[in-house]
Image (cartoon, helix red, strand yellow):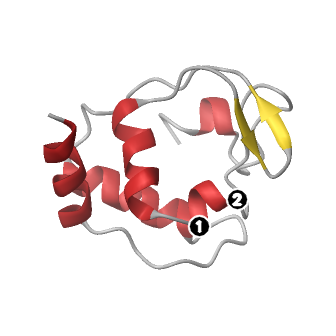
Amino acid sequence: MQRCATCHQANGEGAPNMIPPLIRTTYVLGNKTRLVGIVLNGLNGEMKVNGNLYGNEMPSLSDLSDTDVAAVLTFVRNSFGNKASAVSAEIVKKARAEKK
């Protein structure tokens, strides 16, 4: 709630044309490594999600521990009507190491 809900909203709906939703999107439900990369590296520029264009910057949350990133992403992948497998701290650790 402290880091994500400010932009993505408590209900995961985001903000039209600015912040993409966390609800049933390929970004959330798809490739875990890509999702971890978004959290660790942030995003800058436009991206298309579920056919809609979003343009706000997402800051890097690389200051979070591997365990915290995994917990947040597992929560998001299983909230707001989403049903997807957990993200492990090991996946986060590997993605963080590849980033360097």
Left of 96 or right of it: where is 54? Answer: right
Question: In what element is the residue under mark 2?
Answer: loop
Q: CA distance from mark 2 to mark 1?
A: 6 Å
Indicate the amino acid at tag 1.
Answer: Leu
Which residue is pictured at 22% across the width and 57% down the height?
Answer: 67
Number of numbered tags placed on the structure image: 2
Left or right: residue 19 versus residue 69 is right
Give the residue type that dot 2 points to: Thr
| Residue at left offset 62%, top offset 20% | 45
Q: Is residue 49 left or right of residue 17?
A: left
* 41 shown above or below 74: above
Give percent across and percent down for residue 37: 38, 44
Q: Does residue 43 sit above or below 94 in this rendering?
A: above
The picture places residue 12, in percent across and down from the top left corner, at 70, 50
Residue 28, image x, y percentages: 58, 59
- Dot 1: what SS? helix
- Neighbourhood count class around disc 2 (C-alpha, 10 Å): few under 14, some 14–19, many 20 upward: some
x then y, percent, for residue 70 = 32, 59
Q: Residue 64 bears which disc, if any? A: none
Residue under numbered circle 2: 25
Identify the disc placed on residue 29: 1
What is the crowding at mark 1: few (fewer than 14 residues within 10 Å), some, or many (at least 20)?
some
Residue at image point 72% right, 59% down: 23
Asked where in the image residue 8 lies, by quadrant, the reply is top right
Q: Quadrant of the C terminus?
A: top left
Asked if marks 2 and 1 touch (Cβ < 8 Å), the reply is yes
Q: Residue at x 53, y 42 (%)?
A: 1
